[in-house]
Image (spheres, rainbow, N blue to C red):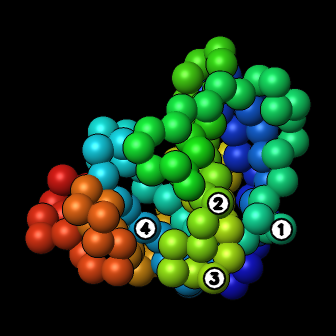
Amino acid sequence: MLRTYLGSCHCQLVKFEARIDFDEGTSKCNCSYCSRLRFWHVQVRREDFRLLCDEAVLNEYQGNNLVAHHPFCKRCGVHVFDRIDMPNGTGYPYINVNIMCLDELDLDAALNAPVTYRDGLHNDWGNPPVQTRHL
């Protein structure tokens, strides 16, 4: 069921709103960035995500994947979401929302949602990695 969630970083400087359907599932990736963050996310369309603060409160990291933008709070450093410019198999640009930054996370819904594992480490996004226990 589609539900609107409010979310924020640790210090509450970064705030956002996202329409999420946990029945559609969550994702975990084994790329060097996501695995180090233990980034557990849900993918939403850009029109279902709204930043409720000034962009100026964000810094951004961009690694070797030029379509992935990793904004984070300038004050507390929490990584709240990613912006993905290229469709990456979806057919549209999207936002990966860090579900642990949802203010009223329905933990049961998140834990019961299907998880898709991505092999970003080997740039094989359509297949799960061999090892997922650490994600």
Numbered disc in front, either 4 or 2? 2
Q: Earlier in the sequence, mark 1 or mark 2?
A: 1
Distance from disc 4 to disc 3, alpha carbons, whole Å, reads 17 Å
Determine whether the residue tagged by mark 4 lies in a helix, strand or loop: strand
Q: Which residue occupies 71% across, 28% down?
A: 58
* Amino acid type at image mark 2: Asp
Q: Which residue is mark 2?
A: 85
Assign the N terminus to one quadrant of the image: bottom right
Sequence-earlier tag: 1 or 4: 4
Q: Earlier in the sequence, mark 1 or mark 3?
A: 1
> In the orientation shown, which residue stands out farthest toward the top?
75
Q: Any mark on residue 27, and which?
A: 4
Is 11 left, or right, of 78 in this rendering?
A: right
Residue under the point 84% across and 53% down: 50
Q: Earlier in the sequence, mark 4 or mark 3?
A: 4
Given residues 55 and 17, the one toward you in this image is: 55
